[in-house]
Image: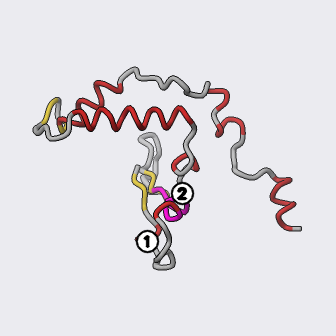
Amino acid sequence: MALLRPESLTMSTVGLPRAALSAVGIQKVKPVPWARKKLVVLRNQPYTVVSPHKGQIETRIHFAEIASKHKGEKGFKDGLPIIAYYIREEMRGYSAPSRLPKKRYPSKERRTIHTVEELRSLLK
């Protein structure tokens, strides 16, 4: 999965701060292996990219600490760049202390940002 920034698609974002650009980003999603048609799909990025919950922040910090610890190392191990190898090994089994239980994932509670009622109220 790759994240396409809007400036690569249009020039209307020139002058926006970096955080604002991230808020309007688009994801390029690779096709799933079981799909017949191998289409590439563009979709809005998840809102947790810009405003992650506490468990995601802890996981990102842990990821960054591992990468920083091995900074400067060179070479490959198990077919991966050495830092990617260490990240894979040290992140395996990691669970953030403040992670959300699966039932409380925002995508499980609400499928979209706005409910139908909220959308109707926006029209008024």
Disc 1 to disc 2, C-alpha distance: 16 Å
Q: Specify the amino acid type for callout 1.
A: Glu
Q: Residue at x 29, y 32 (%)?
A: 66
Percent coordinates x, y for residue 40 in the rendering = 44, 57
Quarter residue 109 falls in: top right
Which residue has dot 2 on it?
43
Residue 25 located within the stretch drawn in magenta: yes
Q: Quadrant of residue 108?
A: top right
**Residue 28 is a magenta residue:** no
Q: Residue at x 86, y 53 (%)?
A: 117
* Magenta stretch bounds: 20-27
Q: Is residue 116 above or below residue 72?
A: below
In primary-sequence order, the first of circles 1 and 2 is 1
Q: Nearer the viewer, residue 114 or 66?
A: 66
Residue bearing mark 1: 7
Residue kind at label 2, given as amino acid type: Arg
Task: Out of 88 and 69, give the one closest to the viewer.
Answer: 69
Tag count? 2
